[in-house]
Amino acid sequence: DDVKIDEDHEILVRVRKTVCDVCSKRYGGYHEAVIQIRADKRKLSKDEIVVIQSAVEDLVESMQNKGNRALFITDSKEEHGRLDFYISDKGSALTITKKVQGKYGGSIKQSPKNIGMKDSRQVYRMTYLLRLPSFRKGDFISYGGSFFRISSI
């Protein structure tokens, strides 16, 4: 017939704490690209720094929400009127740089740096330099003997 057995036993349970690959990279300072924001012949203004920093963070968050879980900002630095963002994914870093350029103008320069090999292939870290124009919205410029006010970029 049906016999119910109720017993207690001690067992050894080993708990192994691990971190997922994305979190490991995030907390290990991993980055595939650096976005450098500079202004031509001038320092970035405090307002530009705040607005651009917010724009980059919003773009990263938007891309994460669209499923790019491996994208994150490892670090950001603001020194002497310049901004640097250390980004986990170089393809996304280029997209972000182009979107910031579309909004604020300027030119992009790409520089690869060989950082070693992985799976018998060369691995490169990219630096994307966005150099904003020397003028800003509201500035006056002289062109052809006339003065013009920059109303938009």
Image (cartoon, helix red, strand yellow):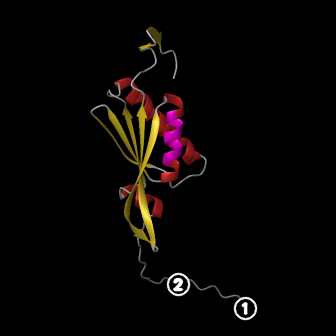
- Which residue shows up at 35% across the image and 28% down it? 44
Of badges 1 and 2, the one in the foreground is 2
Relative placement, left or right, of 103 versus 74 is: right
Q: Nearer the viewer, residue 115 or 56?
A: 115
Under mark 2, the amino acid is: Glu
Q: In the rendered image, which quarter contains the N terminus?
A: bottom right
- Which residue shows up at 35% across the image and 37% down it? 83
- Classified by dominant secondary structure, the portion drawn in magenta counts as helix
- Which residue shows up at 43% across the image and 9% down it? 145
Residue 13 drawn at (x, y percent): 43, 78
Residue 3 drawn at (x, y percent): 66, 88
Q: Quadrant of residue 43?
A: top left
Q: Height in image: 56 above or below 7?
A: above
Under mark 1, the amino acid is: Asp
Relative placement, left or right, of 83 versus 9 is: left
The number of callouts visible is 2
Residue 51 drawn at (x, y percent): 44, 28
The answer to whether residue 7 is magenta is no
Q: Nearer the viewer, residue 33 or 74?
A: 33
- Single out the residue that lies furthest toward the top: 146
Between marks 1 and 2, how big is the CA–CA gap? Answer: 19 Å
Q: Height in image: 104 above or below 64?
A: above
Q: Earlier in the sequence, mark 1 or mark 2?
A: 1
Q: Which residue is mark 2?
A: 7
- Single out the residue that lies furthest toward the front: 144
Q: Nearer the viewer, residue 33 or 41?
A: 41
Q: Which residues are magenta?
A: 93-101
